[in-house]
Image: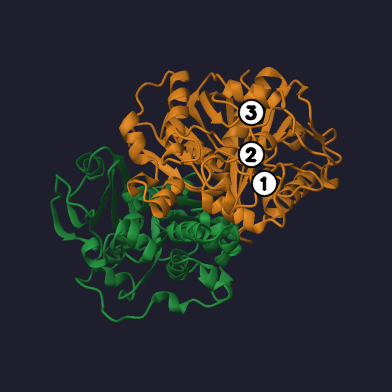
Amino acid sequence: MLITGVGTAIRGVAGPADLLRPAVQEGSPDPTATLTGRGLRYKDRATKLALCAGRDALADAGLLLDPGLTVPGESVGVVVSSNYGNLDTVCDTVSAIAGQDYTATSPMSLPGTASNVTASWVAISYGLRGVNLTLCDGANSGLDAVSWASVMIQARRVRHMLVIGVEPANPVVDALVGPTFDGAAALVLESAETARERGARAMARLGRHARRESHARAVGDVLEEPVDLWCRPDTTPGHPVESAREHDLTALLGPASGALGVVQCVAAASWLETSDGGTVLASTHGVDAASAVVLTGAGR
Amino acid sequence: MPGVAICGAGAVASVGSSLGEMFEALCAGRSGMGRPNGFDLAKYRTGLSFEIDDRPERGRDVPLRSTKWLEHVIEVAAAEAELTDLRDVPILIGTTLRELRSVELRWRDGIAFDLEELHFGPALRRRFGAVRVSTVANACAASLYALALGSDLIEAGAADTVIVAGVDNISESTYGLLDRCYPEAPDALRPFDKARKGMLQGEGAAAVVLRRAETSRHGWVRSVAVNCDAHHPSAPDAKSIAIAMRQAHARAGVVPADIDLMMLHGTGTPLNDEAEARSVGDVFGGTDPSPWMTAIKSMTGHTAGASGLHSLLVAVESMRTGKVPPVVGVREVMEEMAEVRLVRDEAISADLRLAQINAFGFGGLNAVAVVERPC
């Protein structure tokens, strides 16, 4: 399974390669300012961020050219990973009702109370009619989403999967969770055969995935070779991984929750493309389990 | 030849605290409709829902009710399948709202709730030691979408046993916004009625244990097709639903005439029922007589993420017993459904081998399953 396109929508990060830098650029514009079209004011922050990153990943993979998809819509699926994406719609709505009654709500908010609202807007905006999934799995959600995308392609449900990890920063999330990452990262996954047939550029190869009861076991079950780059979890695992280089995306971006795994894979793909191969380990660690994924250079 | 067997099942809803109770109530035409007891009804115009009213104190809502039902149905399904160790079993949970009702209680009322419990992984780790849990938030198509993922894992050989579940309770944000969106408050949920006014929410959970096996207790999952309209955030697209139905038939190697029973999604909303009826007309138009058709939401309410599996388990029970529960409360059936064999008011008896189950959700999500009874 190959990664053939990547995109980001993170303030201070100009593109995927910037995820490997030690710091974000201060004073950069909001990435969602690039969005145009009708109905934007009815979309939540997570959806806008996901639309930007998803658009860039599809374009990077050569699947989206002006004016639309270069492949049939039913051959492209979406999986979005987010834990806090629609908390603002839900909480703002109950506040409005508490302050007055149901008439104080906005009817345009109804689809946003369901947690799949972001994946559905991505599908609508870019015409993606294949399988459409939303994963809300806590800290491991991003790597789970990448893994499920691979299962969907292997099961021949679709030929291409767009994977998006997104979390919004807004007053509701801040009050309930504290300061978090505000942004989205996206990648396109497809089989080597599909990529070859359409002459797509291969950035990285997605290897084994494991979700286990401990970080040590998840990592132990996917690793067969030394690690050149380790994109580590947001908490310090009791069992560190030996690697040539360790990269803490949480230190760079803030706690990324359901987006982290996808951000890690996008950073990994970017690193592998420019470093002529190697092995990257991405791992996440939540209260329920730990996940690990191995990525290698596409040439191997 | 081994197939994807349904080896264990569990369900709860307003009409019953087990699958057996639920099925008996539905065949008897007994509805679970009542007044919501978890919040201040003075804030709303609509005063009806299909609740599981298990709160310790009437009128005072508590967090984590969905999680409690989910644990219960998984335990029942696993026990029936004689599955004792869930540590390495993938568990896929379809849901519209996760534990968002608990978030509302914390946000508005300051009731303690740990945001880590928003998804179901931590609770299932504590209760069953499970570590391969996925919370699939795919709106009202969620549990059949989760069934598709679970079947894929088994068919790919990535797992021998998978648990698929669905769960939802009623959040005030959805209750209030539905109230805001409908021109008038529905007095009942009347699927495929000419004068249907909208859906009413229900609560519940369901779980099945799937196994690659030679024999099956409840039946076989022959196929699950999934797609997305990519058309509108709430209005469904009949063409896309018809594509999902045809895909489900093709994957199962069946034709419309082979389907004996169809569990319609049937939400009682003007647009949903119209789109479903049109797609049924498109795919089954040449099939005479049509399959028997029914829908459970007139008595269970719309159980959202659980509704697909609720329908599937009712289909399984119908095939086992030869009894099909009716749709109740339909006064005049809509024209698009006038020519089909819709079971109304009274249960009927029929010999059934193959059932189709429909589940559709916000965001244009469509899932259609084909299930066969055990030999």
- Asked if badge 1 and badge 3 are on a common chain, one would say yes
Q: Mark 3: which amino acid?
A: Val
Chain that bears disc 1: B
Q: Are marks 2 and 1 in contact (CB under 8 Å)?
A: yes
How far across and how far down the image is residue A33, in percent?
Answer: 44, 79
Q: Mark 2: which amino acid?
A: Gly
How far across and how far down the image is residue A185, in percent?
Answer: 37, 64
The colour applied to the residues of chain A in this rendering is green
Q: Nearer the viewer, residue B53 or B121?
A: B53
Residue under the point 25% across and 65% down:
A276
Could you tell which of marks 1 and 3 lies nearer the N-terminus? 1
The residue singled out by tag 2 in the image is B301
Mark 1 secondary-structure assignment? loop
Circle 2 crowding by C-alpha within 10 Å: few under 14, some 14–19, many from 20? many
Chain that bears disc 2: B
Q: Is residue A211 left or right of residue B348?
A: left
The residue singled out by tag 1 in the image is B199
How far across and how far down the image is residue A239, in percent?
Answer: 14, 45
Q: Nearer the viewer, residue B246 or A87?
A: A87
Mark 3 secondary-structure assignment? helix
Among the chains, which one is orange? B
Cα–Cα span, label 1 and label 3: 20 Å
Residue under the point 37% across and 65% down:
A171
The residue singled out by tag 3 in the image is B314
Q: Is residue B287 left or right of residue B269?
A: right
